[in-house]
Each structure stands twice: as structure tokens, then as C-alpha cells.
Amino acid sequence: MESWKNWFQPHILERGRIYFNEGRVSDLKRTEDGCTATVEDTEEYEVEILLDGDSIEDMFCDCPYAEDGNACKHMAAVLFAISAAEPSKKKAPAKRERLTPAGIVEKIPDGQIRSLLTELISADEKLYRALLLRYGETTLDECMKTLKKELASIGNQYADRHGYVNYRDADEFEGDMADFIRRQTQILLGRGEPLLALRAGMDALREYASYETEEDCAYVDDAMDAMLTDILCVCKKDEVFDFLLKYAGSAGEHWIVQDFVEQAIFSRFSGETFDRKKLELIDGQIADLEVSGKQGYSREYEMEQLLTRRFDLMKKLSSPKEELDAFLERYTNYSDIRKLRVQQALEDGKMDEAIRLLEEGKSADCDKPGLVAEYSEWLMNLYGQQGQRDKLIKELEYHIFVLSSGGMEMLNRLKKVCTPAQWVEYRERYLSGRNYHKLELMESEGLWERLMKAVVKSKNLSILDRYEAALKKRYPDEMLGAYACILTKEAAAASKRKRYQELVHYLKKLGSYPGGTEQAARLAEDWRTRYIRRRAMMEELRNAGF
């Protein structure tokens, strides 16, 4: 188990680590031969690791990538889980650490390095090209042509004629693209061409974006971020910024390219000079979006992102308050800007203006229930702070009965501010409607008889379970009858062993009720008569003693 990471390619190993950290490994079990586990992906995959003592003998996974004998990310995720659950034992003193690449080179006698390197280059075309580009007498034009050919060959290797990369190959495709970005960066930086390395990296990202794949681009993102870090170490920041700015201002770029560029511009560069250029960029993007003819949620989302980003920049640049207020007022029709304006009004102590903006927002955004509920809750908090009880009750009424939002939290809040008589009226109004939390309200109010009738009427096993603790002692006969009725219906529809096991579990549960053992026996006998051809059901009944 000490060297299990050597089974995996670096990007596959990294994806496995991510899956483990995201908690996708479950049901990890020790077996006589090793370990088994389930890994959640686009679907659940079963992984088995065969061990011979502390050494891996073999690994299996039922994912498509592993079908060809490849070590997949699901196997890696399970091995990370095993390592976390059972930390490796201290190494015996005689056991040496695995040598690093630099350590291996140190071991090679000087007289053998050239012959060994010649042998390796002859056997590895990728290594040959990398060394040729770095040390051969190739012009920059020849270098770039070679890199572009290699870039195109990656896509040709994995994509079909429509530019689609099958999900079986997506990890390998993305890993190769990330490796290419890293290699070309080092080659061009080695030749003293940081801006050319950046251009080649952007070309690679554009090429990657042109293919359709079901995987995210985590490896490529990491490679691009590392490339930018390396370039910024040797190049003037303003040159890199201006270079990226050209891509950010190009409307024809793929969203993956645009996203990388904008993230870089707004996270990697700070200072007044850069911030003013960012402001010009955003103003251009806002103007383009306003005349684009784009409609719907997508346009609104993009505009809100741009406007919020611009407002943040204005504050960083210490724009006058009058200018900030004018900007917020101009774009109040966008919900995110409306919220900023409300917050600004509250900071300025203008409570009435904040309330007016929120009331206007409820009307302006009436087609967005979630947003209206947010405005309404904000208003309730303001009315509560001001001690305006009547307005608070009216807003709670709107929130609960018009928006159907807030559940028991809002109902309890309404109860606290109402008189007892008002509350009874509101409670009965809620219970008479088609509201989601009626049963919870009955339980909270101790309306046991009404709750029992509603639970029986639901004919739902999970609802019966949910309120069993509250109703079992008060209405044992009714609860037993409700369970028997629902189990009869469920048994007729059941078809799988797991469901049969669940039904048998309920039969046993009935034994805790007066007369429940007899009722369970009657149900079991009825099922044996009706469903005698269901062998799995018959087996489960026998195993449970029925």
C-alpha cells in the first residue's frame, strides 16, 4: 500500500483525491481479499481492491474507463479513503523512500547520461519534440507550428468528427490538454518568450473550449492558472494585463475563455491604474449588453454581475457618494442593485426610503416569488425593529397566505405578535387551505384528533411514521388500522426484494401495538395467499418468522 499512487496517471490520481475530499466514497468495507466501496459519479460505481498482505494485487471498477484495464479515478478515490481510514504503518528502517526524479538523476554516472538520454528520446516522441523545441535550432515560427500541430493532434485523438469527446475519454482528453499547456509554457518561457507562452496558452484553452465534453475543466483550469503564475513571475504585470484585456473585450470568444480571462483580470491585478482600466472594460461590456438585443434571465444575470462589479470598483476608487447614489438609482430595476440601494439607505439611516424600495421591489419583481419573499422578510425585520406591530402582522399575513412561504417559522412568528383571538382566526384560515405545513401546525397546536384524521386520510406511510410518536399512545387502534390499510396497498405494488424486506419490517413493527401481532399475522397470511408466485416475498416472510 505504500506505493499505490504509482498505479495512476497524475491527473487521474488528482481527480480521485477530489472525489474522496468531496465525500463521494461510501460503504467502504473490509473483505477477506481486500476492500470494496461505492463511489458516486454520474452514477454509482462499485470498486474492489484486492490485497495480498499490504500490497495491491489487483483493482476492479465497473465504470466504462476501467473496462479496458485502466486505473480509474474511482479506484484512486477508494484508495485515498482506505489510507485515511487506516493510516499506513511506520516504515521499517531498512525500507527506503521512493526516489524523486532529481534523486534518480543524481544516481546516474556522468558518463552514462548522454547515452541514456538518447535512448529515452528515441523511445518517446513527446519527449523528443519537447527537447527539440527547447534545445534544437528551431525558429520561433517553427516552434509555434510544431506546438499547434501537437495541439490539433490531441483533439483528433479523442474527438469524433462533430467535435464531441465521449465521456469514457473525457478525463484523458482533459489531462492531455492540461499537460500540453504546462509543457508549452515551460518551453516558451525557456526561450524567453513569456507573452508568446501566454498567447499559446490562450490558443490551447480556445481549442479545448471548441470541443464538447461532459466533464468539467478542472485540470485545464489548474494548468492555465499555473501558466499565468509562471508568466507573471518573469513579465511586467501591465503587459500581461493589456494582453488579457484584448481577450476580455472580444465578444466572439467562447465563454470558457472569457471566464478565465475575467477571473484573471479581476483577481490577479490590483491598484488604481488597473482598476480604472477594469472600469472601462465593464462600461464597454454594459454598453454591448444593452444594445445586444439579448433578453430573459441570462441577460439580467449578466447585467447584474457587471453592475455589482462596477459598483465595487467605484467604491475601491473612492468615487463621490453622489456618484455612487446616482449609479444605484439609475439601475434600481435590477434586483441586486435594488438590494445594494436598500442597504445604502439603511446605512444612511433612511428607514422610510428602504421600506419604499422594498415595497416597490415586491411589485417590480412579482414574477419571482423567491425574490419577493426575500423583500417581504426584510420588511418584516424593519417593521419589527420599528415596533410597527400592525404592519408586521400584515406583512406576515402576505408572506404566509399569498407567497405560501416560510413554513412553521413564519407561523410561529405570526402567533407571537397576534392576540390569541387573532391567532385562532389565522390558524383556522391556514388549516382550511391547501397548505404544506398543516400537519405540523396541528401537531404544534395539540390538535390531536384532527391530526389523526388527516394522517389516516393521507394514506402515506412516511407521514404515518412522521407522526407515530405523537399519535401512537393517544390513538393506538386508529394507528394500527392505518398501518394495516397502507401496508395492504403497498404490498400489492411491491416487486423487489428490498421493498419486501421493508414491508416485513413494518409487520414486525405492528407487534408493538395492542393486537398488532395478530394483525401482522393476518396480513402475512393474506400475502402468502395472494402473492404465492412472488418467491422473494415468500422467502422474506419465512425468514422473519411469518
Image (spheres, rainbow, N blue to C red):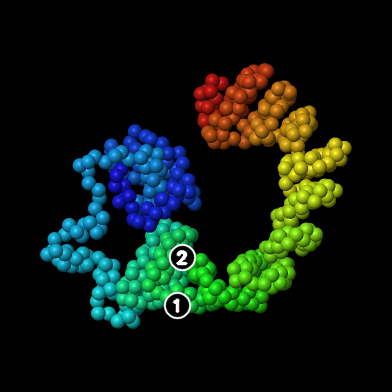
**Residue 416 placement (x, y as % from top left):** 79, 40
Relative height, residue 244 to residue 492 (above, below): below
Left or right of 348 on screen, residue 141: left
For the view shown, which residue lies furthest in the right direction? Answer: 421
**Residue 119 placement (x, y as % from top left):** 18, 65
- Element type where label 1 sits in the image: helix
Q: Tell me what residue is drawn at x 74 percent, y 56 percent.
A: 375
Mark nearer the N terminus (2 vs 1):
2
Along the viewing direction, whichever of 229 and 361 lies nearer the viewer: 229
Left or right of 120 on screen, residue 406: right
Along the viewing direction, whichever of 91 and 406 lies nearer the viewer: 91
**Residue 286 placement (x, y as % from top left):** 63, 74
Q: Quadrant of residue 87?
A: top left
State whether residue 285 appears in this view. no
Q: Residues within 10 Å of mark 1 (few under 14, many from 20)?
A: few
Relative height, residue 165 to residue 482 (above, below): below
Label 2 sits on what residue type? Answer: Tyr
**Residue 298 placement (x, y as % from top left):** 63, 66
Q: On residue 239, which mark appears?
A: 1
Label 1 sits on what residue type? Answer: Glu
Q: Tell me what residue is drawn at x 83 percent, y 41 percent.
A: 418
- Which residue has dot 2 on it? 164
Q: Nearer the viewer, mark 2 or mark 1?
A: 1
Q: Tell me what residue is drawn at x 49 percent, y 51 percent.
A: 42
State whether residue 348 appears in this view. yes
